[in-house]
Amino acid sequence: MRRLTVVTGLLVLLTAGCNAGSAVSDYGTVIKGAKGASVRVDVRPGQRFSLAVADNPSVGDSWDLVAVPDPKVASYISEERQSDGDAPGSGGTTYFVFNGKRPGTTEIRLRNCWRCGQDRTPATEESRRQSGEAVFAVTVAG
């Protein structure tokens, strides 16, 4: 009977997690960045923050996290996107959500790959010119 209770409890937790989806509703402090920009980010331990970049996937514009930051300083939570409208071709914002952990510094690099192929490499000269990185220098102060 106890085993059945444990299994049932696990199934309830798994089902709740699946139904909730991966969307994060609390972006915390939002810090905006852009291609070619370096931005300083100052947060406290336990503080949620998001790095926000404008995008438009309908024209081949997409962002990704180049490397996960030092997990002792900031932990990666998720990537979320909000559209500016329902019309085809509407741009929007991608949010990379993190949580400040322990005092220290780390660098977070987001890469914008414009009209890149499946291998996430710019395929043409125009794609190379339009692609770039946004750099965030994160300091978690104690």
Image: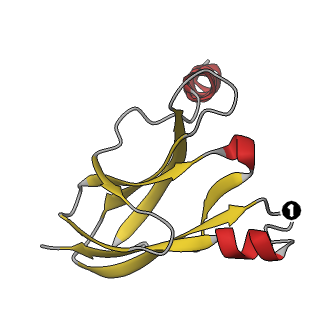
Give the total number of marks visible in the rendering.
Answer: 1
Which amino acid lies under the numbered mark 1 shown in the image of this protein? Answer: Gly
Q: Is residue 24 visible?
A: yes
Please, is residue 106 above or below residue 6 in the view? Answer: below
Please, is residue 11 above or below residue 137 in the view? Answer: above
Quarter of the rendering occupied by the N terminus: top right
Query: Of helix, strand and loop, which one carries label 1?
Result: loop
Image-based side of 6 in relation to 75, left or right: right
Residue extending furthest left?
142
Q: Position of residue 12 (x, y in %)?
A: 58, 20
Crowding at mark 1 (Cα within 10 Å: few <14, some 14-19, many 20+): few
Instruction: Determine the residue positioned at 64% across, 26% down.
Output: 7
Instruction: Determine the residue positioned at 40% across, 62% down.
Output: 33
Q: Is residue 69 visible?
A: no
Residue highlighted by disc 1: 117
Q: Position of residue 61 (x, y in %)?
A: 67, 53
Q: Position of residue 109 (x, y in %)?
A: 50, 74
Quarter occupied by residue 2: top right
Say how the picture is coloured.
secondary structure
Image-based side of 42 in relation to 106, left or right: left
Instruction: Determine the residue positioned at 65% across, 20% down.
Output: 4
Quarter occupied by residue 100: bottom left
Quarter occupied by residue 67: bottom right
Please, is residue 102 above or below residue 92 in the view? Answer: below
Residue extending furthest front?
126
Near-viewer residue (37 or 1): 37
Instruction: Determine the residue positioned at 12% across, 73% down.
Output: 142
Q: Position of residue 118 (x, y in %)?
A: 87, 61
Image-based side of 74 in relation to 68, left or right: left
Near-viewer residue (32 or 42): 32
Please, is residue 120 above or below residue 26 in the view? Answer: below
